[in-house]
Amino acid sequence: MSLATASIRDLRQRLTAGEIHPSDILNDLASAIGARDAEVGAYLSHNLDEARAAADKADLSRPLGGVPVALKDNINALGQPCTCGSRYLEKGYTSPYDATVTARLKAAGAIPFGRLNMDEFAMGSATENSALGKTVNPHAHDRIPGGSSGGSAAAVAAGTAIAALGSDTGGSIRQPASHCGVVGLKPSYGRVSRYGLVAFASSLDQIGPVTRSVEDAALLLQAIAGHDPADSTSLDAAVPDFSAGLDQGVAGLKLGLPKEYFGEGIDPEVRARVEERARALEAAGAEIVEISLPHTEHAVATYYIIAPAEASSNLARFDGVRYGHRSREAEDLLDLYKKSREEGFGAEVKRRILLGTYVLSSGYYDAFYNRAQKVRTLIRRDFSEAFEKVDAILSPVAPSPARRIGENSDDPLKDYLSDIYTIAANLAGICAISVPAGTVENDGVSLPVGLQILAPHLGEATLLRIAKAAEGVALA
């Protein structure tokens, strides 16, 4: 078996036993990338020589010693490109520093290897908005891998990455994980430092792992979690041993099914797969109860006011002066700003900047942005009240399996609405994970779908315990 498809635990056991060297893993990954990535398109770049040099120095005594981990291309790594899937940063920017998560991976002995494709500046749900290449679903090449961390999910699913990091602003780890049949974890807001992540929406963004198993996700989260003085939103909270309770099962736990997540608009087969997992967890000892998250219907509108507003502010730094694309056609400073942004940004990024600027403008701030923040408080309250009754919540990740590439190119609102089950977790700041829940038949193609599990803020230990049980339950 190729080392490229092995688990982190298996690789660590073989590395510490002296059976393999980190370069052996890199060589198998390079072979897999050469064989498959021309079709899948998960990678924007990778530097095998640099990774081999790091492999020769890898400290195998560290928790992730010798294990290569790929990075979404909005996470900075010293000396590597960080394009954010945009023409704006395609040329002229090489990262002068490590993001905190990158530094922590290195401190744990891991080898950052490869830059993964994404929707431009993480704005999208399909990885179709990347300006630098197309990524397809490894299970069906005419289907999207999901987004914005589509490259991360596709690489792990295709066996061209052992594991990866992505970022999740409204479902951008969990939705592609669901579409590609892998595990994707969004930690609680503040659990993982955002320092060195190119910001999309600062009150929503979180970095998290994309892996082939819950156990691997726990190992990666262990490495990257914890307080960081460089990030003012990072929480000074104890980091538990996320692997310690993975095999405790679900006996005695209460799991909620929100009635708002199983109504109109969900594909019947997707609903069936999620309900099958819920019944299996019930058979394993959990109590399943119906709950309500009454403000769910307002989540999409709330998100698409707050996130673009923050993006409008964050992307103001891309002005054609300091780094990235600079127009050669500008006649004066104002013209430089306008033409550099016009030439450098893609259509979806421009759309969200315009929307965000509008809702923050004089006369509209109270009507839109201020009101959205109030509704966000109501959504957060829904979850707080639900978690007084249940230990975690089960739901679909997306209303349907991966759609065809190009299907919504003329109607981006359809993709916005497909985020209905994921964005509330970001608005509330809680943790959530997608675990494979089987497949559905869609126009003659078998496609993966995921089960979403949501847990209270800083409840990752319980979340991972339930996810591990859901991963292994026997279906009736």
Image: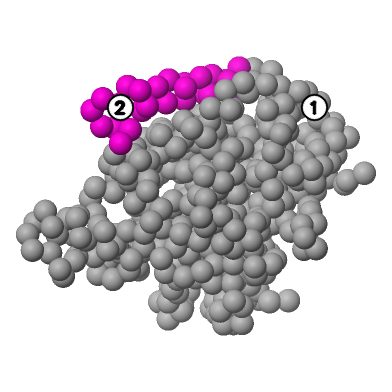
Query: In the image, what residue type sits under mark 2?
Result: Tyr
Q: CA distance from mark 1 to mark 2?
A: 43 Å
Position in image of residue 440 (x %, y %)? 79, 54
Query: In the image, what residue type sits under mark 1?
Result: Ile
Position in image of residue 88 (x %, y %)? 30, 63
The answer to which of 66 and 424 lies nearer the viewer is: 424
Up/down of 55 relative to 304, above or below: below
Question: Disc number at residue 452?
Answer: none
- Mark 1 or mark 2: which comes first in sequence? 1
Q: Is residue 329 left or right of residue 315?
A: left
Residue at screen point 63% across, 34% down: 454
User: Quick one: quadrant of the N terminus?
Assistant: bottom right
How would you rate the neighbour count of disc 1 (Cα within 10 Å): few for under 14, some for 14-19, many for 20 or more?
Answer: some
Residue at screen point 26% across, 25% down: 363
- Picture quarter containing residue 93? bottom left
Q: Which residues are magenta?
A: 358-385
Q: Which residue is mark 2?
A: 364
The answer to which of 245 and 277 lies nearer the viewer is: 277
Residue at screen point 79% across, 43% down: 268
Magenta: main secondary structure equals helix
How would you rate the neighbour count of disc 2 (Cα within 10 Å): few for under 14, some for 14-19, many for 20 or more?
Answer: few
Q: Secondary structure at mark 2?
A: loop
Position in image of residue 237 (x %, y %)? 46, 32
Q: Residue furthest front?
A: 410
Q: Which residue is mark 1?
A: 288
